[in-house]
Amino acid sequence: MPKISPLMIAPPLIFAAFVALAAVGMFRPDPEGLPSTLLGQPAPALPEKALEGFAVPAEGVFTDGNVSLVNFWASWCPPCRAEHPNLLEMQANGMTIIGINFKDTAGAARSYLTDDGNPFEGVTFDPQGRTAINWGVTAPPETFIISGDGTVLFRFAGPLVGSDYEQRFLPALKAAMAE
């Protein structure tokens, strides 16, 4: 009987392992969702520095009894630009939105908000991205729904556009507003 070399068995075993990993990933409960350790926790502090020429968020903005949003954005971020009209619309409908500009230059950020409109009640500036670390932000844009008592209710990674925005973010926002 001929002897089978281990090198002949290794490729099919490696392939089977990759197939098993893919199957496990496909059947996760929410493959699009990214877990956040902040859910149910008080919102972390905002940067103290405002973007020059724009208002700093009001003291106690998260504890005034109203639901608010915190949006991490940058002028160099194409998805941030894609979601901008929806942010402007939410602001026009009375939503309080705090913008945290991070890993950007002050001049580019100011130009962007001046040219395209400012949907933010307050705009803070975090050029090194240190605040983003405290919030668990992986990449812009990311938006957090904050309850009227300052608790983080929901984290949405990605632009506020399309079906994901309509099917995940808006229902979460409506639920938060109904509380």
Image (cartoon, rainbow, N blue to C red):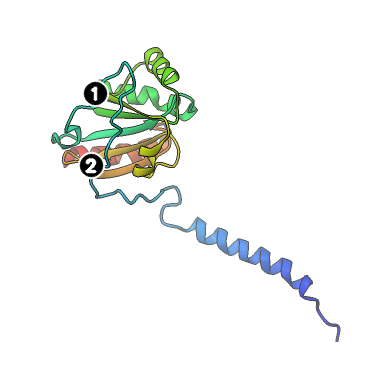
Q: Position of residue 49 (x, y in %)?
A: 30, 27
Closer to us: 20 or 64: 64
Residue at the spot 30% in from the left edge and 44% down from the top edge: 154
The amino acid type found where label 1 is placed reads: Asn
- Label 2 sits on a secondary structure element that is helix
Closer to us: 60 or 127: 127
Q: Crowding near pointer 2: few (<14 within 10 Å), some, many (20+)?
A: few
Is 42 rendered above or below residue 170? below
Q: Quadrant of residue 68?
A: top left
Q: Crowding near pointer 1: few (<14 within 10 Å), some, many (20+)?
A: few
Residue that mark 2 sits on: 175
- Relative side of 56 to 25, left or right: left
Residue that mark 1 sits on: 93
3D distance between C-alphas at marks 2 and 1: 17 Å
Q: Quadrant of residue 158?
A: top left
Is 90 rendered above or below residue 177? above
